[in-house]
Amino acid sequence: MMFRQARWDEPVIFALGKKGRRGHLIPTAEQEIRNRTGDACELVPESMRRSSKLGLPELSEVEVVRHFTRLSEMNYGVDSGLYPLGSCTMKYNPKIDELLANLPSFTALHPYQDETTVQGVLGILYKLERWLAELTGTCEVCLQPSAGAHGEFLGALLMHAYHKSNGNCRKRTEIIVPDSAHGTNPASATMAGFKVLVVQSDDDGCVDLDALKAAVSERTAGLMLTNPNTLGLFEKNIEEIAETVHSAGGLLYYDGANLNPLLGKARPGDMGFDIVHINIHKTFGTPHGGGGPGAGPVGVSKEFCEFLPVPRITFDGESYHLDYERPSSVGKIRGFYGNAAVLLKAYAYILSLGFEGLKEVAEISVLNANYLKKKLENVKGLALPYDAGRPRKHECVFSAKPLKSDTGVSALNVAKRLLDYGLHSPTVYFPQIVDEALMIEPTETFEKEEIDRFVNALQRICEEAYTNPENVLTAPHNTAVSRLDEVKASHPRTMALSWRMHQKKNRPNLQMS
Amino acid sequence: MMREIGIKNIEELYADIPEKYRLKKPLNLPEKGLTEFELRKHVEKLLSKNKTFDDCAPFLGAGCWPHYVPAVVKEIVSRSELLTAYTPYQPEISQGMLQALFEYQSMICELTGMEVANCSMYDWASALGEAARMAARIKGRNEILVPEIISPERIAALNAYAEPAGISVNKVGYHAENGQVDLEDLKRKISDKTAAVYIENPSYLGFIETQAEEIGKEAHAHNAIFISGIDPTSLGILKPPNEYDADITIGEAQPLGNTMGFGGPLLGILACRDDMTLIRQMPGRIIGATTTLDGAHQGFCMTLQTREQHIRREKATSNICSNEALCGVASAVYMALLGPEGLRELGETIIYNTNYALKLLSEMGGVKAPVFKSACFKEFTVNFDQTGLTVREINEKLLQHQIHGGKDVSKEFPELGETALYCVTEIHSKGQIDRLTATLQKIVERR
């Protein structure tokens, strides 16, 4: 299958349009109003009046539409094809969920409206909390975090609050993470004031129990763990891991990035996890929007409920309320109640699938990952490190190390060449414990034919690496632009982080027309 | 596929999960899914229990504001190539998103006068937390001074972000008469421990802080960073933060093309001057312009990733990765549609409407509006002490007339008595403002 992405050579918007053009008219204040208030200029104290002209572009409506339409044509989403970024769970985003979240009976709601006027949305959020608690085996869920990492930050704050309430916060200063953990785990723990201790993985890709036992101490605040881990392997010693951490007085935190394969099959809460975050934009089918908005609700076991952020949504049997009277709460980690629009889509997602459907989501995601693993096992140039015989869960991680030493073609080159086939690349160079890693998560979304297309493409690329490496090394060829100079982009001398900065440095990076 | 893998049952792929952890019975969730039609009816019915008044937007702001979202904005952010994409890790196939975000950053810079902006924070409140930490890292100091008049959402988030970093948050008092920051109090409190001084313009209670320049001078005299918090809809007519020497500017860009949606998603602004000491400590993703390796074409990619968690792990400037990118695109489209004249007119219409509402209320008798003798933009305080009614009672009565009244701030600022924070934007017509004030008058008189 041929792929040619649109190449518009579209100028930066500042180089478009013409002086005096307008794309949208703002209602002007009625004359009667002006008569009463006097001139706008006089309504602003002189010391705070803007005198400089705004340097925004001036475009007609159709120019704006055409510009951004062209930009969208130079982008690739799940709706374009397979998007197998490992640990990102790029599944289909149901269109009906978008429609529902765009209803004016939701979008026009102000968060400070009287409780009696937002009973519909409060009911939806309350129900969603209950369902997420049920799916994760936790007691209560807080919807406030805006993203997975935001949930992790909250989780770490909750650990701190818990130890503090037991008089232990000065002592319990360390959070342990495995070397295969997502980068957010150590970053979140540090943000919450903890020191990070890294434990090695075992030869089979799971947490090394002996290393963990050596790492835990009276300083341990908790362990942050992803299960299945970033190799797609279920941590088989989870019972012993939980026992080790708990008996040392530490807590167990579940990074929910990889929850998809466990939906309706197993629950973190049952495995001893005390605090769990959920990536709504991964597991519950809401679009990632090119980086966000997402949502990262946090579920907790009973002992932690009192520390959750305010307000909590309560139900008295008749109506819903926002309860701020939680004296032990950690407070707030953002404004208002969370990314309600994203959460509403998750509510619709769960309702459209039901328990049976969610279980099927998990099963098919695992079936797809293992099918992919099987099909790629014999591809020359690729290796499957860590317990190749064990089934994976939602993802599998191959190494392009043999390919690189045979041909000079790296995982990055393979990733770039995949783009030429109209396929998104897997996550590369992660987890860091795999050399030349290609981390592949097909999700349940894609049918066998699309997965086969990916397998065939990867096979052909590896063959090409042996026969015509140059073509792979210089990929991509069919995308909107060829390989970019990322060093130039980050070098202080050539860096242009805005149009203003670009103009100031007078760099020729950008096309003027 | 199962044949290919060599299994007879999908359960075999779960065999390595200890038996005791495998769910044996259904969970307490709806067992079967709904059809799309059933789902739509169900959600529509639930949402119809909410009360939104088609003929009048709420007079509520305080961090999330009612504005009009042009049809073009929704059309663009619904393009599925943008909507269903992940973070642009592979820039060559993601140029559309990258360029749109670069343009968002660039237009935020034009509005604020800053030279660098990241491509979004979760919201204003968390942006404040991150800005405080950024300043503390740069200065190696552990205190931030904030105005006493500040939103409860923002101060709560700031505390949550600051405390684990050992940053103390201290408040600077205000003049009872006009709400302006008390410069004497600032001078008393600022020291060589102060990493940053933060002000908001317009303030949380809607008035314009006129001493921005003096406050900035005071901050810089103590080698502290000056952070300004802004509402971007004001910047068509208000002085941009670079003109009063702000080093970092934060704020909320939800009003630029994003609906209120019950308070989320929002869109946090974080921008700063072109200074590598600042830039290297910025949190979040930043998109930069570059060229193809052969130099033949322009292109865009994520830059300065060595600040970020996926590379730096525990040494990262922040843990943020997923952000509010698509809301940023919406804002870029909005700013491009309005252009310089539109942004100015937006500011003007808002300040006209605000002052018209204030005028009617100040003439009404029985209420005091505004509480502070300072110019206001978009929001203002109304005190009801003389009416003998609480804000809560007033709002309940307004609701009977299909009006969402202002935010009750009497618990947040007990010294202000029964005071509400009202918000008037470009979408509140003269007729609606007249109806609000007439209704308030009736409520007050009928008591």
Image (cartoon, rainbow, N blue to C red):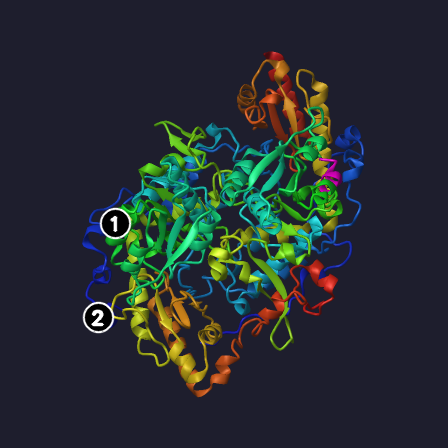
Residue A269, position as x, y percentages in the image: 29, 46
Q: Nearer the viewer, residue B93 or B165?
A: B165
Total residue callouts: 2
- Within 10 Å of disc 1 (Cα), the crowding (few <14, some 14-19, many 20+) is some
Q: Is residue A16 above or below residue A473?
A: above
Q: Chain of mark 2?
A: B
User: Label 2 belongs to which residue?
Assistant: B6
Same chain under badges 1 and 2? The reply is no
Q: Amino acid at mark 2?
A: Gly
Measure the alpha-carbon separation of dots 1 and 2: 35 Å
The answer to whether residue B105 shows anywhere in this view is no
The answer to whether residue A50 shows anywhere in this view is yes
Magenta stretch, residue numbers: B209-216
The answer to which image quadrant residue A178 occupies is bottom left
Q: Amino acid at mark 1?
A: Glu
- Report the mark closest to the observer, 1 or 2: 1
User: Label 1 belongs to which residue?
Assistant: A243
Q: Residue at x 46, y 28 (%)?
A: A116
Q: Nearer the viewer, residue B176 or B109?
A: B176
**CB under 8 Å between discs 1 and 2:** no
Whether residue A455 sits left or right of residue B145 in the image: it is left
Residue A433, position as x, y percentages in the image: 38, 67
Location of the N terminus of chain B by quadrant is bottom left
Residue B171 among those drawn in magenta: no
Residue A22, position as x, y percentages in the image: 72, 52
Q: Residue at x 47, y 84 (%)?
A: A469
Residue A332, position as x, y percentages in the image: 48, 38
The answer to which image quadrant residue B56 occupies is top right
In the image, farthest residue toward the bottom:
A467
Whether residue B359 sits left or right of residue B143 in the image: it is right
Q: Chain of mark 1?
A: A
- Within 10 Å of disc 2 (Cα), the crowding (few <14, some 14-19, many 20+) is few
